[in-house]
Amino acid sequence: MAAGNDRATTLSEVARVAGVSLATASKAINGRADVAERTRRRILEVAEELNFTPNPMARGLLTNRTSTVGILTSDLEGRFVLPILMGAEDAFGAGKVSVFLCDARGDAIREQHHLKALLSRRVDGIIVVGRQTDPRPSIGRDFPIPVVYAYAPSVNPADTSLTPDNEAGGRIVVEHLLACGRSRIAHITGDRSYAAARDRVVGIEDALSEAGLGLVGPSMYSEWTERWGRNATAVLLQQHPDVDAVICGSDQIARGVIDTLRDAGRTVPDDVAVISFDNWQVLATNARPELTTVDFNLENLGKTAARYLLTAMGERKLEPGVHQLPVSLVIRGSTIPQR
């Protein structure tokens, strides 16, 4: 009864052998509810016996779905973007959905070109991934498919966006330092124009205020580099030699901070605790001592964005607004001595 190896079995052959109409066979193969269970089982058994494989294009025409999605990023080389993409692709793979990945390289014209190409391929949904947490322009509300923004939220509150909770990250580091008995806490961070830097300061200052404390000196802003960490710490020690903890805006900055503290004869964490953000493994685990740092769980962010999109593709409405996802603290030897 099995079809020959020289050609693929057609749906018409499945219908004929099962003794049903072509329409009924199509409904059973595509999981439609309006088919009697006994009939569905017979059709699926025949399809398996004949080694029938649905043609993806034809199936897409029948179901108005292509089981493909687009991921549009502005920074394919970015360290923050890559784990988000990996998480999203893992979630889509589990749902048997294929991904078209497009890199706009931060160019608005290139982004529009990619969007038109994705729509022409009849993707079922799009995830727009930003390279930093600053709000970005919406790609528009006239799309016939669902769109989810990841990492960089849309400026349009009617869109659905997912981003790490940087303000909560600021609170977490202060709470940890207070629990370690620190009270003279300084803050060295990166570019003030970054939303992440500003949001973390809000969390840091609020948590300190609730404890009846304030930062030692103002927050120090500049580059997201080890060099800035070294230079800023030299200035900090001159102005506030009794500092007992430093919050760093990134693991790179923290590495520079530790270098200068060591050069100044300060032991980390006994004399000065150092805590940071990002949990960049290659930096955090190779620092001496290893860095206590906030992990923004970016792979989980990507998976969550994919699940939101899969839900919307299932014809459930997306919840608009910016959804801030939890962050976590990875405690290592730069705040608590490791024996």
Image (cartoon, rainbow, N blue to C red):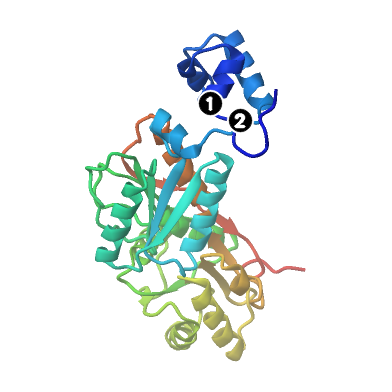
Which SS class for mark 1? helix
Say which residue appears at 65% left-offset and 65% top-offset.
332
Viewer can see residue 206? no
Question: How many discs mark residues in the rendered view?
Answer: 2
- Mark 1 belongs to which amino acid? Leu
Residue 258 position, x and y percent, is 57, 81
Say which residue appears at 32% left-offset and 61% top-offset.
134
- Mark 2 belongs to which amino acid? Phe
Position of 180 relative to 190 (above/below): above
Q: Could you tell me how far apart the alpha carbons at marks 1 and 2 are, in whole angstroms?
A: 7 Å
Drawn side of residue 49 relative to residue 184, left or right = right
Q: In the rendered image, which quarter contains the C terminus?
A: bottom right
Residue 49 position, x and y percent, is 69, 25
Given residues 98 and 149, the one toward you in this image is: 98
Given residues 87 and 156, the one toward you in this image is: 87
Asked if marks 1 and 2 touch (Cβ < 8 Å), the reply is yes
Q: Residue furthest right?
A: 339
Which quarter of the picture shows residue 111?
Answer: bottom left
Drawn side of residue 137 relative to residue 31, left or right = left
Residue 229 position, x and y percent, is 48, 82
Residue position marked by numbered label 2 in the rendering:
52
Drawn side of residue 179 relative to residue 60, left or right = right
Identify the disc placed on residue 11.
Answer: 1
Mark 1 surroundings within 10 Å by alpha-carbon count, few (fewer than 14), some (14 through 19), many (20 or more): some
Q: In the rendered image, which quarter contains the N terminus?
A: top right
Residue 109 position, x and y percent, is 24, 65
Specify which label sits upstream in the sequence, 1 or 2: 1
